[in-house]
Image (tube, grey):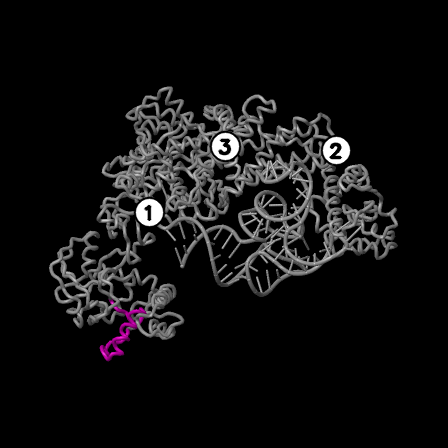
Amino acid sequence: MRQLEETALSAWEHAFESNPSQKEKFYLTVAYPYPSGAMHVGHGRTYIVPDVIARFWRMRGREVLYPMAFHVTGAPVIGISKRIARGDEKAIHLYRDLYKVPPDVLAQFVNPLTIVRHFSEEYRRVMTECGLSIDWRRRFTTVDPQYSKFIEWQWKHLGEAGRVLKGAHPVRYCPQCENPVGDHDLLEGDKAEILRFVLIMFRWKDAFIPTATLRAETTHGVTNLWVNPSTTYVRALVDGKPWIISRQAAEKLSYQDHEVRVTEEIPGYTLIDQEVSHPLCGKVPILPAGFVDPDMGTGMVMSVPAHAPFDYIALRDLQSQGKYQRIHPIPLIKVPGYGELPAKDAVERAGIRDQTDPRMDALTQEVYGAEFSQGKLLEKYGGETVRMARDTVAALAMEKYDSLVMYEFDVQSVVCRCGGQVVVKILHDQWFLQYSDPAWKAQVAGHLAGMNLVPPEVRAEFERTIDWLKDWACTRKVGLGTRLPWDPAWLIEPLSDSTVYMAYYTIAHHLSQIPPEELSPDVFDYLFLGKETENVVISDKLRQMREEFLFWYPYDFRFSAKDLISNHLTFQLFHHVAIFPPGCLPRGMVVFGMGLLNGAKMSSSKGNVFLLEDAVREFGADTVRMFLVGSAEPWQDFDWRNELVNSTRKQIERFWNTVQETRAAGMSENEIDLWLLSRLQTHIVKTTEALERFQTRQALQEAFFAVEADLKWYKRRLPTGSAGDKALKDLCSVWIRLLAPIIPFTSEHLWKETGNAGLVSFASWPEEDRSRINPGLELSEELLSRTVEDVESIQKIIQITPSVITICVAPSWKREIFAAVAGAIDKNAVIREIMKDDAMRRRGKEASDVTRQCITLIHKFPPQLISQYLQGSIDELMVFSKARDFLEKEFAVRVNVTDAGESTHARARSALPFKPAIIIE
RNA sequence: GCGAGGGUAACCAAGUGGUCAACGGUGAUCGACUCAAGAUCGAUUCGCGCAGGCGUUCGCGGGUUCAAAUCCCUCCCCUCGCACCA
């Protein structure tokens, strides 16, 4: 097998380098990999499915371009190399034991570039081993200087078009690493969201006591503040003004654009019973509460007992001890289903005893949810819906009452991989791609409407993503990448530098030969947009590149896994419409499902992976390919299980053996040969249609299993001792080609072995030969096989050793009824119609019984079969008579064939069209 | 929570009103071949049945229809995404 693979690989070495030609083009691309680790079988499918499609269209005579490159920009490898450098057990285990990186290479991984170089080489090697028909001349990495020039050109356009804006932005930030942190950098709190709180500024003496709230509109109903008496608060000068807040809050605020200077400590208990004031609620006292967390918000809480269950119950607890009797909840929101004091209702309905009840969180959600979705402020507070009042009051407070915004996580603890506590930091001078721009969105949506999406169900998700996208922070301080042309302190973020590179592929092999300093934006303007300026001398070389770009672009299909819909796949549409003219916009996308390994999600970090290279070594490239494209359609999730893969290998072996056996086939052509070839035409059509629709699994069902099933029947029908005839040889030529896109190694070998010149990879795709389709013959065989099945099932039940089997075909009058029933629209009225006929009426009950039986029968048959039966006027008696030898061989008993009308046996009466009576005795 | 997709026999999976007890594949069981194992071939694989049939199934429950896995409603469960990250 290795031998066979190597022979094919050397024959293919430069075969798939494609250049513009007279042929129609087909350009497909896949999201390029980020080579930070070894390829597993999930990656394998991502690249093998497009390869099957590429090979298919190549055989259909298209000039196919399937390029590949490597995405090495971004931060992950930097973290990886740091972890390896510091001797992190987990990282070293992953790379040394799972990815099998040799020790000397691993030692060099302290340099991040070495990691991506190592794995991109490995990717290329393994991809080649899998038989991917990639044009490797076009390969590049995203840190190549020429590519950086391309990115600079792209961003120059985005910048000039006003798509890139500067702004401030809250991010998760690790003070220890001095860096923003993404989900994968977190030890704890990986789903933490940043919430935008409004600080309500209460006055206390000369200072502010700010409370953080998501519900600014409830300020009207504040009856008191809560302070934790056992916490030590601080007095701090925040932007020059004195605030009383928790120590943690002071620290947090310092990351959020505030200058904070702590001046003294204030024990919480000293604040109790102090009086504070706010214009919206007047003077209120400070009360003690143990539930106040100094690490949440400012460490100070405003209390709205009418609408917040926590506040209500905390107040009730205090009052039950006889304290603060003068405080009463102040209602301000009206909600259907609740009384004046929703918090009170909810607490009492749930029978809550005190504030330690575990149901309090759910209760809070319930009340907040109801108020947000259905609540309205009382008339004296403006009468607005809560949904709107929230923003109105917040705006008012910020404008007039000194309120500010404070960002905070929605979970308690967020911890960086380095162990540091993560905070919210406001980043300044951050650049944003303005995906929120409605005009830009509309442009993308408009283009999407005309795109070919596979499977069609993903359209809704794309539409929603376009709608939902907000501005995207597109620059970074850390990582590999290209610098922003007009602000070189920033690097272009790695998703943003991978949006129009499909255009780069079309001329990548030329670009790599040009010194990067010559690749000015003006040059790219000419190459990609056809814009000529005096700054560029249009050489023949440039002219040729321009033509090559125009030949290939736009791409026909982009392939990627479905988790990229909400970013990459949609981003690249935004960038295309922003930069390229209508004639160069993407035509289609194919979205993949995810991969499972033995039923569990594949994940490198959890060690649940099967390396692609190991799979190829163990099972052979063709087996891996056939399994990956055949076990599910591309957009469905697939599950890699060794036992199933093993049986795939056996299937390929069976194919191989069958082709070998045909060498013994004769040259004559019998009816069953004609049948086999007739059937084959349908399989050709169905395989072709399936591949046109990217249904690799369906294609395999037709091209492999359906053909195999025919062969089974064919061999059964051959006379004893026959090894088959000419049809087998014709079939093999077609069969090898139908399977070539899926199992190219085996096919390449067999193609040569069966005496064909040239590579099967470039052989012409089989086309259906209508003249070979013989519906009458197919119908006869169908009748025969159905009857054989019936005989077998009867034999199984009755368990006697028969001495003779008689097949009685239905008499002509029953066929008339059958035809009448089949032609009738109203199957219930047909019985009356039939009985109008004198000859039928004379048959009496038998005729009406037969009619009823025909109705049932017709419902059971495929409609196609019925229409063919009606047109073909098949001679059943003849079919069975001709097949008598076969039937006698099958059942090893004498077989009689007769017209049921001529039999006196009681069972003969049950004969129906296409369902002869069978008498076994 | 929100958005998108999905739940079919031991497993994977086809099937969107009568072709459906439900294609195909896998696994399992039996049989043939073999000294044996493997491979290969044949049969069976919801229940019942000594005549090709009948009964009950397609996440749960309800409804529409002569007829529902397929259409409608309630609920339950799974997968993906929810952003600065590949």
Tell me residue A637's x, y (percent). Answer: 48, 46
Q: Residue at x 47, y 24 (%)?
A: A10
* Residue closer to the observer: A250 or A95: A95
**Magenta region includes residue A304:** yes
Q: Which mark is residue A437?
A: none
Q: Which residue is mark 1?
A: A184
Looking at this view, is A843 or A292 the one in front? A292
Looking at the image, the residue that sits furthest to the top is A540
The span from disc 2 to disc 3 (Cα, nearest Å) is 43 Å
What's the magenta region?
A: A302-329
Q: Nearer the viewer, residue A802 or A671?
A: A802
Q: Residue furthest bottom?
A: A322
Q: Residue at x 29, y 61 (%)?
A: A214
User: Above or below — where is A629 with respect to A752?
Assistant: below
Neighbour tally class for label 3: few under 14, some 14-19, many 20 plus, Cα within 10 Å: many
Chain to which mark 3 belongs: A
**Disc 2 versus disc 1: distance between alpha carbons?**
67 Å
Asked if A854 appears above or below A508 in the picture, the reply is below
Q: Is residue A678 left or right of residue A842?
A: left
Residue to which mark 2 is pinned: A720
Q: Amino acid at mark 2?
A: Thr
Q: Nearer the viewer, mark 2 or mark 1?
A: 2
- SS of the residue under disc 1: helix
Left or right of A232 on screen, residue A97: right
* Residue A739 within the segment the image draws in magenta: no
Which residue, given by chain and number where applicable, does mark 3 sit on?
Answer: A54
Pick whichever of labels 2 and 3 is earlier in the sequence: 3
Q: Amino acid at mark 3?
A: Ala
